[in-house]
Image: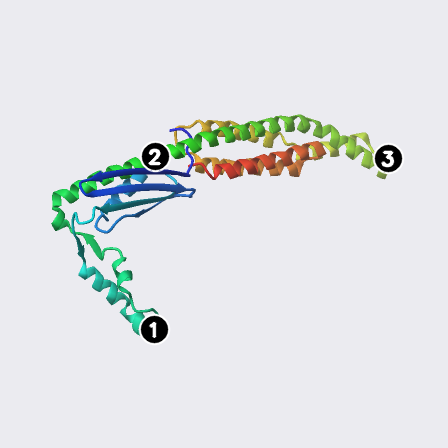
Amino acid sequence: MSLSGMTGFGRAEGALGAWSWAVEARSVNGRNLEVRFRGPPGFEGLERAAREGAQARFQRGQLNISLQAKRAEGAGAVRLNLEQLDRYLAAGEAYVTAGKAAPPTLDGLLSLRGVIEADAAAEGPETMADLEAVMAVAIAQALDGLAQARALEGAQLAIVLAGQVHRIAELTDAAKGYGAEQPGAIKARFEKRMKELAGDAASEDRIVQEAAAMAVKADVREELDRLAGHVAAARALLTADAAVGRRLDFLTQEFMREANTLCSKSALSALTAVGLDLKAVIEQFREQVQNVE
């Protein structure tokens, strides 16, 4: 699989006999996979098909799958589930008696899940099974459409992310040049300061020794090497055949860690400017990574 986003929409429609239906599948960003299904009374068994279909196609995102079905007027019957209705009434009786809730209305009761059901006896068991089977196919088609939309978003994200990784690589290369200038700049600055304070008493050996110690502390080669390694890892993830959103998110934290250290060690204004540019690009990269599955 190529890079996939987490935002998209899919729709499928179908009909069988007197029944017609439409399925819509939508998804937005999410740290994990969350699936919510809403269907008509009497077809609760389709929730399993919706969840299993989503789990087979996606690893992250908040998915909402809705199935709307209707039957031609006069083509069949529905059944009032009195047992379910009594359970709802019993559950709410104490709240109504205590004045914590208003008495239920008929239209409110009839809208509760499981109160009105398609009359399976009137349909016949074979007909209901056939209906659920073809509706499950429509759910799969809607999920396929959603997957295509997320793949399209992923292709667009891949272009943006690759450009940002390329910019991080460019800035890392620029930082290498300034990093090589740091020891000389530190020595010159320290020597000037020592001569201001000690005059001719400032020993050249002492200046070299102290400047060398300061240069070791300000050495940014390790950070630059790690940044280059992270660039290579990011490029590999952007072409990986897997869901890489979590790994890219972790890699973004590592990018920022090295950029922060680079800025804290900088002894040159030019290197600091590069470090700040790096942090800005990494933050933009982080924002886009949040959209990757």
Horizontal and vertical percent position of residue 247: 45, 36
Q: From the viewer's perspective, is the residue at label 1 or at label 3 nearer?
A: 1
Mark 2–mark 3 Cα distance, whole angstroms, equals 79 Å
Mark found first going from the N terminus, 2 or 3: 2
Check disc 2 and report its element: helix, strand or loop.
Answer: helix
Check disc 3 and report its element: helix, strand or loop.
Answer: helix
Q: Quadrant of residue 11?
A: top left
Mark 3, Cα crowd under 10 Å, few <14 / some 14-19 / many 20+, is few
Q: Residue at x 27, y 69 (%)?
A: 93
Left or right placement of residue 275 versus residue 63 in this view: right
Q: Work out whether residue 56 can be spotted.
A: no
Q: Residue at x 74, y 34 (%)?
A: 210
Residue that badge 1 annotates: 99
- Mark carried by residue 145: 2
Q: Residue furthest bottom?
A: 98
Three-letter amino acid code of the residue under disc 2: Gly
